[in-house]
Image: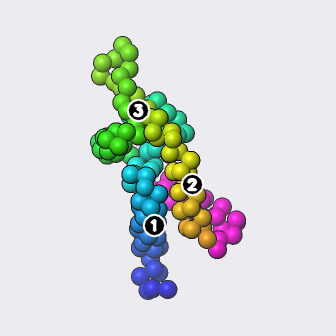
Amino acid sequence: MLEIFDSLCILLAKAEQKHFLYTKKALEEAQLEISPGQLVVLYALYKKDNISISELSKNVFLDNSTLTGLIDRLERVNFVKRVDVPHDRRSYQICLTDKAREVESKIMQVMRQVENKMLENCSESEVITLRSVLKRIFTNF
């Protein structure tokens, strides 16, 4: 293994870089018109749709300004729409479109493909440990 991988910080960063590039390519090959960042937003909306941008921001752990750009791009490809909230002209909800619902199974298939590749040759106990360690790293920051 490369000497720079004796640093866990570098190893984690490089593993995520490879994961990102692999996911980007898989999404392109599936002709889904979305980026890995947009994938995160769609995944969260598949779990809970028709929510405010503030709630979505909390669910995906992104600030509102970063999320607004992702929503804008998803709106341009007709995967989400902003819906006004009655009785509050300043607020809107983020909702999935029919187009997004139609490709949900394809998106989930790509996510499974990426996860299977990522965890290839890992035992179930290693996967459980990896998930636990990554959650702890996330919480520590």
CA–CA distance in space, label 2 to label 3: 23 Å
Instruction: From the viewer's perspective, tell me whether residue 117 is left or right of residue 24.
Output: right
Query: Is 128 in the magenta?
Result: yes
Residue type at mark 1 is Tyr
Q: Which residue has dot 1 on it? A: 22
Q: Which residue has dot 2 on it? A: 109
Circle 2 Cα neighbour tier, 10 Å, few/some/many (<14 / 14–19 / ≥20): few
Residue type at mark 2 is Gln
Q: Which residue has dot 3 on it? A: 94
Where, quadrant-wise, is the C terminus in this rendering? bottom left
Q: Secondary structure at mark 1?
A: helix
Q: Secondary structure at mark 2?
A: helix
Label whose residue precedes the other's in the sequence (1 or 2): 1
Q: Secondary structure at mark 3?
A: strand
Instruction: From the viewer's perspective, tell me whether residue 12 is left or right of residue 120.
Output: left
Q: Position of residue 37 (x, y in %)?
A: 40, 52
Query: Is 103 in the magenta?
Result: no
Question: For the magenta stretch, what is the residue range?
Answer: 121-141
In this view, the residue farthest toward the top is 87
Find residue 93 and report its image quarter. top left
Asked whether the beta carbons under mark 1 and mark 2 sit within 8 Å of each other, the answer is: no
CA–CA distance in space, label 1 to label 2: 14 Å
Instruction: From the viewer's perspective, tell me whether residue 133 is left or right of residue 16.
Output: right
Circle 1 Cα neighbour tier, 10 Å, few/some/many (<14 / 14–19 / ≥20): some
Rendering colour mode:
rainbow
Q: Position of residue 69 (x, y in %)?
A: 30, 44
130, 73: nearer the viewer: 73
Q: Residue at x 57, y 68 (%)?
A: 117
9, 71: nearer the viewer: 71
Instruction: From the viewer's perspective, tell me whether residue 127 is left or right of residue 91.
Output: right
